[in-house]
Image (tube, grey):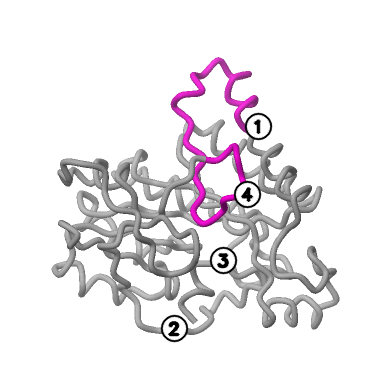
């Protein structure tokens, strides 16, 4: 039995649906995932800043046909910096580039996001490669976008190598700035085909330490949501609305899809 109960917001967007606030008393800590760091979210996050980690999802597609109602990237950058200016610890913000479309342009866009935040002094990132569920393929077709994998669900080996190459480029960018590579964490969960990312769950031993929770030995990696999930089994969902969030994204992240 896990020693701690850690909340997470995979069934929606924590910046839009603030119902997680009322459940914070029932968990030892929480990981809040959002594409929209709204003023109300900032106020709520500051009340629980010692107890939460924020995954700020920014793919670089905000305001495009893929994420039509997501704030533009420059707005997301500004909102993240505002959260820090209000006093939220920078080390507890994870830049989540999720999902990546593993085409040349898709990898370039992801790299631009990561390099921008490296330049801003952020050290921790989480990535995933888009899973083309049947309903996601239908959304792509409906707006005339090409399917990155054709009729298939997941990327081929060369596409995964392209994402690994993107991660290497990000590491080289950090080195070019004269910063130590050991400080950079680019993580992924349920992506066994990637070799350049750190394989760990969205809630891991690193997070428990960051939340100042003592666990003695490395936490379990049972993973109960899908194959290859590495998350701590004490994870509990804080949102109840298991439906597409109001951002109307075509490239839905795997966490939101799993909650459907």
Q: Residue 145, how many percent across, how many down?
A: 83, 71
CA gap, disc 1 to disc 2? Answer: 35 Å
- The mark that comes first in sequence, 1 or 2, is 1
- The mark that comes first in sequence, 3 or 4, is 4
Q: Quadrant of the N terminus?
A: bottom left
CA gap, disc 1 to disc 4? Answer: 15 Å
Q: Say if mark 2 contacts mark 3, CB within 8 Å.
A: no
Q: Residue 80, how many percent across, how many down?
A: 45, 49
- The mark that comes first in sequence, 2 or 3, is 2
With 87 as the anchor, is 249 left or right in this view? right
CA gap, disc 3 to disc 4? Answer: 17 Å
Given this view, does label 3 or label 4 mark the residue nearer the observer? 4
- The mark that comes first in sequence, 1 or 4, is 1
Which label was assigned to residue 168? Answer: 1
Q: Secondary structure at mark 2?
A: loop
Per the image, the residue denoted by label 2 is: 242
| Snapshot quadrant of residue 238 | bottom left
CA gap, disc 2 to disc 4? Answer: 28 Å
Is 182 within the magenta?
yes
Magenta range is: 168-197
Q: Residue 120, how many percent across, how many down?
A: 51, 34
Q: Say if mark 3 contacts mark 4, CB within 8 Å.
A: no
Q: Secondary structure at mark 3?
A: loop
CA gap, disc 2 to disc 3? Answer: 14 Å
With 49 as the anchor, is 84 left or right in this view? right
Per the image, the residue denoted by label 4 is: 193
Per the image, the residue denoted by label 3 is: 253
Q: Secondary structure at mark 4?
A: loop
Residue at screen point 31% across, 57% down: 232
Please tell me how crowded label 1 is: few (under 14), some (14-19), or many (20+) other residues with Cα within 10 Å. Answer: some
Residue at screen point 71% across, 37% down: 165
Please tell me how crowded label 2 is: few (under 14), some (14-19), or many (20+) other residues with Cα within 10 Å. Answer: some
């Amino acid at each position: 039995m896990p020693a701690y109960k850690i909340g997470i917001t995979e069934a929606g967007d924590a910046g839009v649906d603030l119902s997680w606030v009322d459940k914070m008393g029932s968990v030892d800590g929480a990981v809040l995932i959002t594409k929209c760091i709204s003023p109300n979210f900032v106020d709520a996050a500051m009340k629980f800043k010692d107890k939460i980690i924020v995954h700020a999802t920014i793919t670089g597609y905000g305001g495009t046909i893929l994420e039509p109602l997501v704030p533009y990237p420059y707005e997301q950058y500004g909102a993240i910096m505002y959260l820090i200016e209000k006093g939220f610890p920078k080390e507890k913000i994870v830049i989540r580039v999720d999902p990546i479309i593993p085409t040349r342009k898709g990898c370039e866009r992801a790299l631009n996001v990561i390099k921008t935040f490296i330049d801003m002094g952020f050290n921790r990132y989480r990535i995933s490669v888009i899973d083309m569920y049947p309903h996601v393929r239908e959304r792509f077709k409906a707006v005339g976008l090409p399917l990155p994998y054709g009729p298939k669900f997941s990327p081929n080996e060369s596409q995964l190598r392209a994402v690994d190459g993107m991660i290497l480029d990000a590491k080289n960018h950090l080195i070019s700035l004269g910063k130590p590579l050991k400080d950079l964490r680019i993580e992924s969960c349920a992506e066994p085909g990637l070799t350049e990312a750190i394989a760990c769950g969205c809630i891991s031993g690193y997070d428990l330490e960051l939340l100042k929770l003592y666990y003695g030995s490395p936490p379990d990696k049972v993973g109960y949501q899908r194959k290859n999930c590495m998350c701590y089994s004490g994870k509990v969902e804080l949102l109840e609305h298991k439906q597409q969030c109001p951002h109307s994204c075509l490239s839905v992240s795997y966490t939101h899809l799993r909650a459907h």
